[in-house]
Amino acid sequence: MSVHTPASDPAALRAALERPGACLVACFCAEWCDTCRIYRGRFDDLARARPDAVFMWIDIEDHPDWLGDEDVDNFPTLLIRRAGRTLFFGPMLPHAGHLERMLDTLDAASPAVATLLPDLESLLRRAAARA
């Protein structure tokens, strides 16, 4: 499965978001960030290896409102959500292996973490519906 962006194929994004039990993995990045550009290829590879998850690449300068009251000061900053619950939100070293191990570890029984993020799934569905 490929990595979605807010401007990607709206039908594919809607279908991915509607899959029961799909895990949302979002990378908040910035176009000017060299680390993000390097990490993008690894993130794409992991998305292809994990078709059960919905991988999103979100440029925070194009979509600052999608962060709500959260600040992103370090890149990449990742979000992992399952069943409408945030299980991880924060910066992560740009090594796909770290994210892969985290995805192997986090499940429906993992505790939720509090964030000031808006409901990202709803924002993505609205963006896909408008496109």
Image: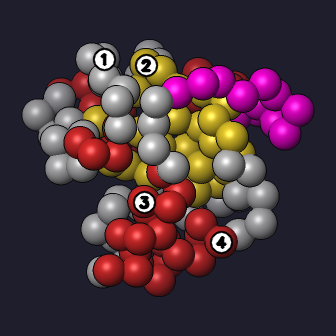
Residue visible at 78% across and 58% down in the picture: 21
Q: Secondary structure at mark 1?
A: loop
Task: Identify residue for label 1.
Answer: 74
Q: Residue furthest left?
A: 32
Image mark for residue 91:
2
Image mark for residue 123:
3
Q: Quadrant of the C terminus?
A: bottom left
Q: CA distance from mark 4 to mark 3?
A: 13 Å
Task: Note whether residue 95 is visible.
Answer: no
Relative to 23, is 55 on the left or the right?
left
- Amino acid type of the residue that numbered disc 4 sits on in the rendered structure: Glu
Where on the picture, by quarter, is residue 128?
bottom left
Q: Quadrant of the N terminus?
A: bottom right
Q: Mark 4 vs mark 2: which is more N-terminal?
A: 4
Using the image, determine if residue 38 lies above or below residue 54.
above
Q: Are marks 4 and 1 in contact (CB under 8 Å)?
A: no
Relative to 118, is 34 on the left or the right?
left
Dominant secondary structure (helix, strand or loop) of the stretch shown in magenta: loop
Number of the front mark, 2 or 3: 3
Q: Secondary structure at mark 3?
A: helix
Q: Are marks 4 and 2 in contact (CB under 8 Å)?
A: no
Residue visible at 34% across and 30% down in the picture: 69
Residue visible at 69% across and 40% down in the picture: 85
Q: CA distance from mark 1 to mark 2?
A: 6 Å
Number of the front mark, 4 or 3: 3
Q: Secondary structure at mark 2?
A: strand
Q: Are marks 4 and 3 in contact (CB under 8 Å)?
A: no
Q: Are marks 1 and 2 in contact (CB under 8 Å)?
A: yes
- Amino acid type of the residue that numbered disc 2 sits on in the rendered structure: Pro
Number of the front mark, 4 or 2: 4
